[in-house]
Image (spheres, rainbow, N blue to C red):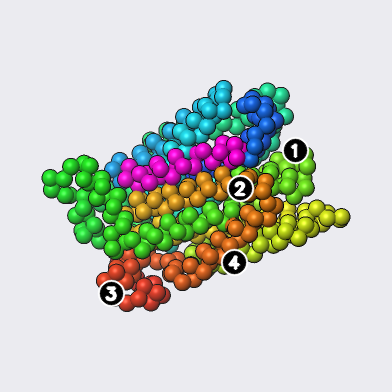
Amino acid sequence: MRLLPEHMKKPPRYIWACVLCSVNGLLFGMDTGIIGPATDMKVFKASFGGSQNATIHGLIVSSILIPAALSSFFAGYLSDRLGRPKGISIGVFVFGVGAAIEAGAVSLGMFIAGRVVEGLGEGLFLGNLVVLICEISPTSTRGPLTTGPQLLITLGLVVGFFTCYGSSNIQSSLSWRTPFILLSSLSMILCASTFFFLPESPRWLTLHGRHKEAAETWDKLEVSQAEREKVELQSETTEVVVPVATVKEKAVHKLLDIFSKDVRTRTALAVFLMGMQQLSGIDGVLYYAPLLFQQAGLASSEASFFASGVSALVIFAATIPGLIYADGWGRRHSIIYGGVGLGAIMFLIGGLYAGNTVHGTFGAGRWVVIVCIYIFAIIYSLTWAVAVKVYSAEIQPQRTRASATTLAHSSNWLFNFLVALTTPILLSKSSFGAYFLFGGCSLLTSFVGALFMHETKGRSLGEIEEAFKHKATGGKNILSALRRPMMKSAV
């Protein structure tokens, strides 16, 4: 019998650190999976004044998102000042407090206030998960490892949907409170675990002049010398040591640095991609899955809840091959071809509704719509869910990676808010308008990606940065730079 290689028997510690970091993504997934079914429960509606119109429903669901967009804008600066694990744990703690307020809400205003607090925490920690993993992962495994948070987000969707499915038969307010109680409890556990056990980014330590600690952390993470990317930080650390600058001046400089000439194109591309990721309609599907399935013809709440849970399982299952083959498929192709697929599915669903074939005599159209919703979720999970977030982080230089990535997440939250707020309104006004809107946005993103995106798979962060520097200084075109054979990493 052939013995397994030693590294397969005992994974290096950087993998366990990435797993611990990724588990925090479970919280975002659970909240997304909980909020739609919970607010659709009869007991929830009875607790807060009976039936709610589409606008109120959209406001309840989306109230988490604008606070998340605002806090996400400053999350990178907080992470740059305090360190990645501390920034993440602070966000997770605030998130848990918000979930606790929701669980104990005695009025609709208190419930919305809890979602606002939850959003502030969510914006602080979510974007920094990919940043930290990106900075502690060797080039050879960076693609799969940076998709870890997305995998745990999809697992959270499953847990959230089925928690609501299991608690929906409780004949009291515990039917909708129980999922939030569990979410808050898990948040506090992960907050403590992240704070005490997650190691600091060696790149962050190096950027702050703590070179000895950085070397010790690389050793602790068991990243071999051969795998460590050569990072030239001398020119990047000059902004850290600014003579006689006040704290306020440093903060403004750090925030505005993402718009400097050498990085603003990358910042804009990341912001665009993260925003359009939401305008594909994915969170319209996730937040309002019960509503979509009811619209398609699943009349009972139990059936629509179960179908929503199945959609979460489909998303989780599809994310696994997306994680495994993240580097094989590449970021550019995943975004371009994924956008074409997402757009085609949305136009098909919209066309079926526009042609009044969904609820025809034989009812075949409804099953086509239901299957298309699942196919949409699969395509998204295999492509955009993985590629967009990884690409947005890895194209940034070290000095602005946290700030630019979290700004991109702010864009994601803002458009998420628009989708969450308007989806039930659009569906109540037109059965097909929302699908055509989302389909058009997906195709637009594919077009922009084909024009401006350049492949980054298999390249070290240093090589990516060097390619962008050549472009910024009038050197070779970035496309040519990124297509050059990978340079051998210095030992």
Q: Which residue is mark 1?
A: 302
Whether residue 318 is in magenta: the answer is: no
Mark 1 or 3, nearer chain start: 1
The residue singled out by tag 4 in the image is 340
Mark 2 and mark 1: Cα distance apart in space: 22 Å
Q: Indicate the secondary structure of the residue bearing disc 4.
A: helix
Q: CA distance from mark 2 to mark 3?
A: 45 Å
SS assignment for the magenta stretch, majority: helix
In the depicted view, which residue is nearer to us: 455 or 366?
366
Q: Which badge, 1 or 4, comes first in the chain's sequence?
A: 1
Check disc 1: other Cα within 10 Å, few if <14, some if 14-19, many if 20+.
Answer: some
Mark 4 nearby-residue class (10 Å; few <14, some 14–19, many ≥20): many
The three-letter code of the residue at mark 4 reads Val
Task: Using residue 414 as the reference point, say whether residue 287 is left or right of it.
Answer: right
Q: Mark 3 and mark 2 in contact (Cβ < 8 Å)?
A: no
Q: Amino acid at mark 2?
A: Thr
Q: Residue at x 77, y 39 (%)?
A: 300
Find residue 343 and report its horizontal and vertical position in percent. 61, 63
> Which quarter of the image is occupied by the C terminus?
bottom left
The residue wearing badge 2 is: 423
In 3D space, how far apart are the residues under numbered discs 1 and 3 (Cα atoms)?
61 Å
Magenta span = 55-78
- Amino acid at dot 3: Gly
Camera-side mark, 2 or 4? 2
Question: Is 409 on the left-hand or right-hand side of 418?
Answer: left
Instruction: Please check the rendered image and state whether residue 69 is part of the magenta-colored stretch, yes or no.
Output: yes
Instruction: Write down the residue under mark 3.
Output: 474
Q: Amino acid at mark 1?
A: Glu
Residue 307 versus residue 279 in the image, above or below: above
